[in-house]
Amino acid sequence: MSLSNPGGQWRSAELTTQQSLGVGTYTWNMIGDFTTIDPNVVLGLFPYSTVPPVGARSADGFKEQDIEFARWGVPGRGPINYTVYPGTVMGQNTLTGDKQSFHYEYAQSLSGTYTTHRMTRTATSVMIEGFHGHTTALSNRFRCVKFSAVNNAGSLILRTDVRIGSGALTTTTVNKGAGLSAADFISAESMPLHMNLWLFQGAAPRNGQTTSFSFTNFTFSTTPVSSSC
């Protein structure tokens, strides 16, 4: 995928599957150094629904589950972002700020330009992993983040588990109270898969350079991987 500038006009790139994909395991083998991504460039890998939930006028801000390499116009941010948006209006109404069920952002050094990124979707969780090289061997995993929504004694708990390399697991939780379900915060809906490379707020790259990332393989399995953070 390339962000190009033919004739002085910037052009983005996007791919979308014709088939909707649901619960299961998504794996991308990627070539490219995302650690040097320009502050105005965004690379996104994400299931996205164009069907609004009941009571919503637009699908934007719902159901989407993202792996994004972006700094959102700020050089010191990111560049790796994992985000899950709520599945329903009821879920969104309990959220503040950007109205995201979950968001995790971090920087990562690389041992080369070959990386693997894996998303595992279930009805109650989204787990995202990054690996050095084109492998999913746990010895090569540099980060695992698992977002989950679980019921505990009648209360809905939003939980984020993080493991950096082979380090200790850290967990944070938010209690959303009673009367809510996992589907309010994590959608299990089958959705088209999008991959895009674009300019944040339409602003040209600050470095004035074109950008490209290559994908040597993408696979989808309806069976979620058994590994966890």
Image (tube, helix red, strand yellow):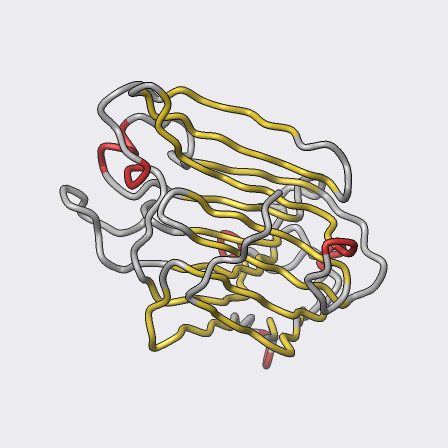
Looking at the image, is 195 positioned above or below residue 164?
Answer: below
Residue 167 percent location from the top left of the image: 77, 36
Q: Is residue 227 left or right of residue 121?
A: right
Residue 16 percent location from the top left of the image: 41, 73
Q: Residue at x 72, y 43 (%)?
A: 107
Q: Is residue 60 left or right of residue 55?
A: right
Q: Residue at x 45, y 22 (%)?
A: 174
Residue 147 percent location from the top left of the image: 49, 39
Residue 2 percent location from the top left of the image: 61, 75
Q: Considering the image in quadrants, where does the N terminus appear?
A: bottom right
Q: Residue furthest front?
A: 226
Q: Residue at x 73, y 40 (%)?
A: 164
Q: Considering the image in quadrants, where does the C terminus appear?
A: top right
Q: Is residue 76 left or right of residue 184?
A: right
Q: Residue at x 51, y 61 (%)?
A: 45
Residue toward you, 79 or 160 = 160
Q: Residue furthest left?
A: 55
Residue toward you, 40 or 151 = 151
In terms of image quadrants, where is residue 7? bottom right
Residue toward you, 170 or 217 = 170
In terms of image quadrants, where is residue 130? bottom right
